[in-house]
Image (tube, rainbow, N blue to C red):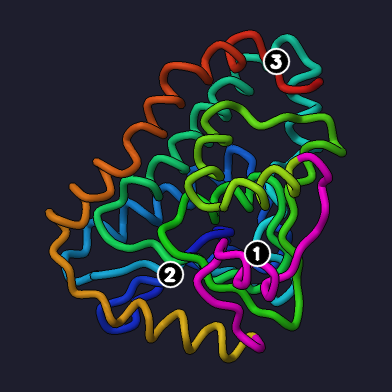
Amino acid sequence: MPNVRWEKIDSVARIVMGQGENRHNPTFLEEILAAFDAVEADPTNNAVILASEGPKCWSLGLDLDWLMAAAGDPARHDEVKRFLYRENDLFARALLFPMPVIAALSGHTFGAGAILASACDFRLMRADRGFWCFPEIDVSIPFLPGMWAIVRKAFPYPLLEELTLTGRRTTATELERRHAILKACPDLAALDAEALAFAKSFSKGRGIFGEVKRRMNSPIVEVFQRDDPNYIERLQLTA
């Protein structure tokens, strides 16, 4: 059974990740990219909610067990490089998708999961459960330049600097107060209802919406293309 599926609610597409930790590995990436493709192929969709089936985790980021095993095997280095480029493809898909992409953060949002949420246009998060965290400083895996460019678009810099250099976990309430998310919702039911109502409020044309996002976010994608290969090709993933 796929870990990622999508469903339609009137004019809104809801891409739903599975009930586990939703860690990023090659299978996960191909499934979520295929879901974005299917959503775009339906011309009646006006907005996308990116959600998780489970109430504990939205996404805990990279599948470190898979990544470290693959990176430690020279015969699999090309596989790791493909994975990292496909991770950037996912971030770029959200950044340039021709309709609003709304992250409905129902639980822990860590690492590459937090970067994916930052690549979305809007973020809502439940306030009664789950933390946001950039743990890279603690696992000795620094952001690639493109990841840094993504989170800088979503976070006010003083907060971003603090969270990336300390690895501190933070809550939806603080993120709303410091303007990193659109809204902290009191519980899961409120998160689902508010994300859906917000998504339904959009009826913008894909042409103009996509062009505005392209002009806003193409400099970030250019960082993927220009700077990230310097680290990916050498597999300089850890410090």
Residue 167 in picture, x, y percent from top left: 82, 47
Residue 157 in picture, x, y percent from top left: 60, 46
Q: Nearer the viewer, residue 102 or 220?
A: 220
How dense is the environment of label 1, judged by Cα within 10 Å: few (below 14), some, or many (20 and up)?
Answer: many
Q: Which residue is mark 2?
A: 49
Q: Amino acid at mark 1?
A: Trp
Identify the residue shown where x is 22% and y is 50%: 212
How dense is the environment of label 3, judged by Cα within 10 Å: few (below 14), some, or many (20 and up)?
Answer: few
What is the distance, in whole Å, between disc 2 and disc 1 at their CAs? Answer: 12 Å
In the image, which residues are magenta? Answer: 165-187
Q: Establish if 88 lies above or below 225.
A: below
Quadrant showing the N terminus: bottom right
Q: Is residue 186 magenta?
A: yes
Q: Amino acid at mark 2?
A: Ile
Q: Is residue 176 magenta?
A: yes
What is the distance, in whole Å, between disc 1 and disc 3 at their CAs? Answer: 27 Å
Identify the residue shown where x is 76% and y is 63%: 170
Q: Which residue is mark 1?
A: 58
Q: Which residue is mark 3?
A: 236
Q: Amino acid at mark 3?
A: Gln
Q: Establish if 98 lies above or below 72.
A: below
Q: Earlier in the sequence, mark 2 or mark 3?
A: 2
